[in-house]
Image: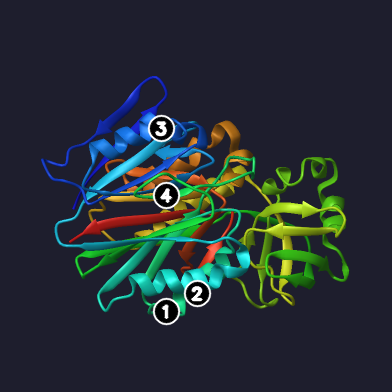
Amino acid sequence: MKSILIHWQNGQGWKTQGSLEGKDPQLVIYFGSKKALDESSAFEHLQKMFPKAHLMGCTTGGEILNEAVWDDSISASALYFDDTRIRTVELKADHADGSYHVGRELASALQAPDLSNIFLLSDGLCVNGSDLVRGIFDVVDSRSIVTGGLAGDGANFTATYVGLDGNIEPNTIAAIGFYGDKIKIGYGSVGGWDPFGPDRVITKSKNKVLYELDGEPALDLYKAYLGEEAKGIPATGLLFPLSIRPNEEHKHELVRTILSVNEEEKSMTFAGDIPEGYIATLMRGNFDNLIEGAATAVGHATPMSDTPWQLAILISCIGRKLLLGQRISDETEAVAHVLGRKVPTIGFYSYGEICHQKFTQQCNLHNQTMTVTLITEI
């Protein structure tokens, strides 16, 4: 396997790092802001650069290239595989209620005895990521590795786009299946958020919508805890995610990000399922813990390993970027310090991250995490 990095900036065009040594790549993965991807000449040029490759990408809340974090750019990697077969699929999801069935359809299109792993990108607003993952694993073997993320739109939450071999569009899910025993994948996903306030029981919810905590309107409780910060919801809600777990004894929680609120219903819509009966705890960010969480995610992806990784894909939540502000590159530098600065790295800031948990070995939709996918052939 060989990979190169490509980066586009307005006024500077595309710049390439590395060499494919005359090989024609089979795959290009790209991440860009809506503004940058609206520059049709930039995307058209990318297609002309790699006419034989599948191109898969999405919109973002910021782009990652090695240790640097960019805005209004496009970061990409072109990959050539020596001994790995790939297959791609693109589907439409018009509403969140159909996400489970889309997951099954996607997995059925990619399923094969030698399927090793799936990397996917999904619309970040109209898809229920939890249902999407459940649908996939109703078809593929539980040992298959699935990683990816939900497209972003900065802090706007207006529209997110995904594309495969053509223009990027809303309501779209795209995925790549990797086949054979030569491809190796490392993965890790860690948050680093701190809990505050008491644990509460989710007493009324439906799918992604939370109505009541301990029998009280969820939005009223949330605003009471946030105080002045509540005036900027849902954007400020990114800085105060919700941790959920099945019961008090369950130590490995999922974190959920607010997408929108309904003032009349006093409800909140999150990026993933909020099951009734679960325990919920409000979270807030600590800079050092978030950065340490990013480094820990790499540690989970490379446990006791000297594998020569040939590409790292980082998917981190837009809430982390908003909170860390000018310190945002601290988390990408923390990743590079653990991983080594010779591993080519691309990534983006998302509305949700898809990855297996280290402790449960189950794949879930996560919010507010740094998720690391490492790729190589041996």
> What is the x, y in percent for residue 25?
20, 48
Residue type at numbered disc 3: Ser
Query: Which is nearer the eye, 313 or 157?
Result: 157
- For the point 63% across and 76% down, which residue is it? 250
The secondary structure type at the circle numbered 2 is: helix
Evaluate if marks 4 and 3 touch, with contact meaning CB atoms under 8 Å apart: no
Confirm whether residue 357 shows in the render: yes
Evaluate if marks 1 and 2 touch, with contact meaning CB atoms under 8 Å apart: yes
Give the numbered dot on residue 40. 3
Q: Quadrant of residue 255?
A: bottom right
> What is the x, y in percent for residue 79?
24, 49
Which residue corresponds to mark 4? 163
Horizontally, residue 114 falls left or right of residue 166, namely left
Measure the alpha-carbon separation of dots 2 and 3. Answer: 34 Å
Measure the alpha-carbon separation of dots 4 and 3. Answer: 13 Å
Give the numbered dot on residue 135. 2
- The quadrant of the rendering that contains the C terminus is bottom left
The secondary structure type at the circle numbered 3 is: helix
Residue type at numbered disc 1: Val
